[in-house]
Image (spheres, rainbow, N blue to C red):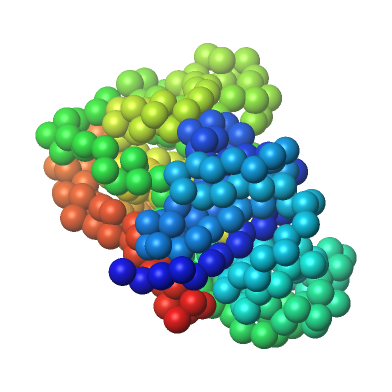
Amino acid sequence: MLGNSKSVLFIDNSDSDFTGDDLNSTKVRGTESSLILLAESFVKKNINVKVLTEVKQDVVCNGVLYGNKHSSQEKYYDLCIAISNANLFRNISSKKKVVWSNSLQPFEKFLRKKQLLPFLKYKPEVVTMCNYQYRNRSYLTSMFGKHMITLSVDPRFYTEPVDLKKIPEPYALNNVRSLRNLDWLIDIWMNKFQNKEKKAKLFINPNLIPYTEELQNSNVFERKFGSREDLINELRNTRVFAYTGHKSDIWVLTVEEAVQMCVPVVTYGIGSVEDRVIHNETGFIAKNDKEFAYYLEKLLFNNDFYNSIRQKMYKRRGFKNWDYIADIWIKKFLY
């Protein structure tokens, strides 16, 4: 077993008072859920872990101690991991310091967020979440070392049973929480499937775009997802995950969740989605609108085509789990 009395401190940069008990709630998003799951994986490897958030009082969840980030921290840690903000290292004593970056942070933003002086003072290394982010983060914003360590997803997405014999209805899903190119996707969908394929349905997050009269009379439907269990059940009944990608994407947790549930993804591979989707293995990366619509149609209506890629996806399921990710962190920064 790795670890053996090493200690790690995480410092969250949001205003949330989350703890590990909130993993299945809408309170946490991609960064927070990744922090929780990595922290719990460290604990399983005999590492002492504390996470600082806006929680009012100390609480222990699954072996992880959660405390208030404004309280005094007198303990010395082997590793301190701050989410995207080097100012969080103030008054923290640790052998190593790492900024776990969840944004591209161009140099202009780096200066605007007042990161230069704390970087020079604390000399943290930077960990990015994907190759796209790694390539686009400049030397000046990661001057003391830069690493790429990918993320995983909630283990339920790669441990819940998947029935490869089941052929879902021709339903497509896009549950990305932001607007990011959703109008582009809907234009492709309406042009291809609105009049020709009435059985096909596209489900999107509500309130992201004006739900016009045209959409009200279409086969595009709003669908709200509460818990991760809700999403898992929805993915079991989804034929394809449709998302163009966006230049601001760093992780796109929902794409990886779909991949782990063996739901093929159709995308343009813009931004970090190029890291999430392997063409003809976990989905398809289209070069233009015509190809995007072609792959959607093939996956929605050609059972042999759909089954073929799902078999490939099933073999890759759960390979890069949180235990695997935690070992990379430990070997890089603790031993």
- Measuring from the top left, give residue 326's x and y in whole percent: 42, 64
Give whichever of 296, 102 is nearer the camera.
Answer: 102
For this view, does 40 lie left or right of residue 156?
right
Q: Is residue 325 visible?
A: no
For this view, does 12 lie left or right of residue 233?
right
Q: Residue at x 16, y 38 (%)?
A: 164
Q: Height in image: 98 above or below 224?
A: below
- Measuring from the top left, give residue 300's x and y in whole percent: 29, 35
- Measuring from the top left, give residue 262's x and y in whole percent: 28, 44
Q: Residue at x 62, y 79 (%)?
A: 95
Give whichever of 99, 130 is nearer the camera.
Answer: 99
Q: Residue at x 57, y 32 (%)?
A: 26
For this view, does 149 lie left or right of residue 294?
right
Give whichever of 176, 195 is nearer the camera.
Answer: 176
Q: Height in image: 119 above or below 30?
A: below
Q: Is residue 172 visible?
A: yes
Q: Residue at x 34, y 42 (%)?
A: 157
